Amino acid sequence: MVETTPLTPILGARITGLDIARGVDAATMAALRAAFDRYSVLVFPDQRIDDAAQIAFSEGFGPLERTRPGAPGAGSAVVILSNIGPAGEIAAPSDKQLLNNKANRLWHHDSSFKPVPARASLLSAREIPAAGGDTEFASMRAAFAALDPAEQTALRGRVGIHDFGWSRTRVDAALMSEAERHQHPPVRQALVLEENPHGPALYLGAHARGIEGMDEAEARPLIERLMALATQPAFTYAHRWRPHDLVMWDNRAVLHRATPFATATERRHMVRTCVAGAAPTLAAA
Ligand code: OGA
Ligand code: MN
């Protein structure tokens, strides 16, 4: 019997009573998709899965993204977030890993810089540190609902500009290659996503550079105010990982970020899959 236990009044639910490694039947998958729309973040404790089982389960939510060239796991359907080297020892991070680690500590929606950004991300904790290395989530649906109706109307239909080169340069200018910058030109995304059956969501995050038709002096404080609204404690859930947790989140309803841990002395090994978006955000808005 699958059980759903809400984690906060706003977002997140723990799902127990299923063994993902053994496969999930169609009726249960339908219930999980409904819970996912409702809660935005689903926590599945104690799921001992390998990459193949993670991929198979993730595909129950839709076709998967291929990992970006230049990222660990490139070309496959998994991204490895790890400080463990090939010999099984804690490894000094490469420049690229350093950049990714620092960037993950900013509130973001995964791949909002792509023309069709990810719908969902699933992260499996294979090894976790004794302290730190949590993942935090913030409800962009709660943030939208908290705005006054006049502002909601003003924001609906507007277009955010998401620029990977810009956001990476803000994290560390020296680590961003010219080639990567050219690979990801700025893209237009809906500022308010209307696709969730439980209510609209703001769509911003670290890659959101500006708002079409608004100058920078107006757009930057607006973007920062809206993100501060979403990331207030009442609208967030902080996940303290246990080994073999699988956590999935709705990139079209929540922001997320990593918290620091002692990377030189503690082991952390996570495997991520991403369910591709079914349509561009502007078409879905
Ligand atoms: C991710 C991510 C945060 C973390 O996998 O997309 O941002 O805590 N992870 O590892
Ligand atoms: Mn992420």
Image (cartoon, rainbow, N blue to C red):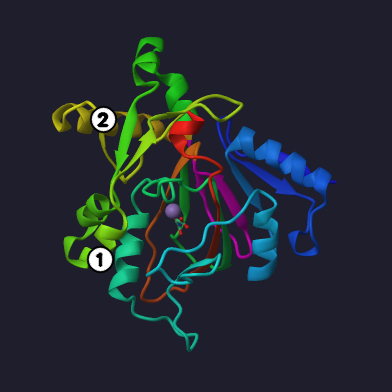
Q: How far apart are marks 1 and 2 (CA)?
A: 25 Å
Looking at the rendering, the stretch of residues picked out in magenta corresponds to 236-251
The answer to which of 15 and 203 lies nearer the viewer is: 203
Amino acid type at circle 2 is Glu
As displayed, is residue 69 above or below residue 230? below
Disc number at residue 263?
none
Assess whether mark 2 and mark 1 are in contact (beta carbons under 8 angstroms). Answer: no
Point 28% across, 32% down: residue: 223
Estimate the x, y position of residue 168 in percent, counting from the top left.
26, 56
As displayed, is residue 195 above or below residue 279? above
Estimate the x, y position of residue 49 in percent, counting from the top left.
68, 67
On the picture, is 274 further left or further right than 265?
right
Estimate the x, y position of residue 187 in percent, counting from the top left.
33, 43
| Nearer-N-terminus badge (1/2) | 1
Element type where label 2 sits in the image: loop
Element type where label 1 sits in the image: helix
Query: Residue 188 colored magenta?
Result: no
Task: Answer yes or no: is residue 234 visible.
Answer: no
Residue 250 occupies quadrant: top right
For label 1, the residue is 179
As displayed, is residue 263 above or below residue 1? below
Point 64% across, 64% down: residue: 244
Point 28% across, 51% down: residue: 185
Residue count near mark 2 (Cα–Cα under 10 Å), binned few <14, some 14–19, many ≥20: some
Disc number at residue 212?
2
Residue lying furthest left in this view?
217
The answer to which of 158 and 272 lies nearer the viewer is: 158
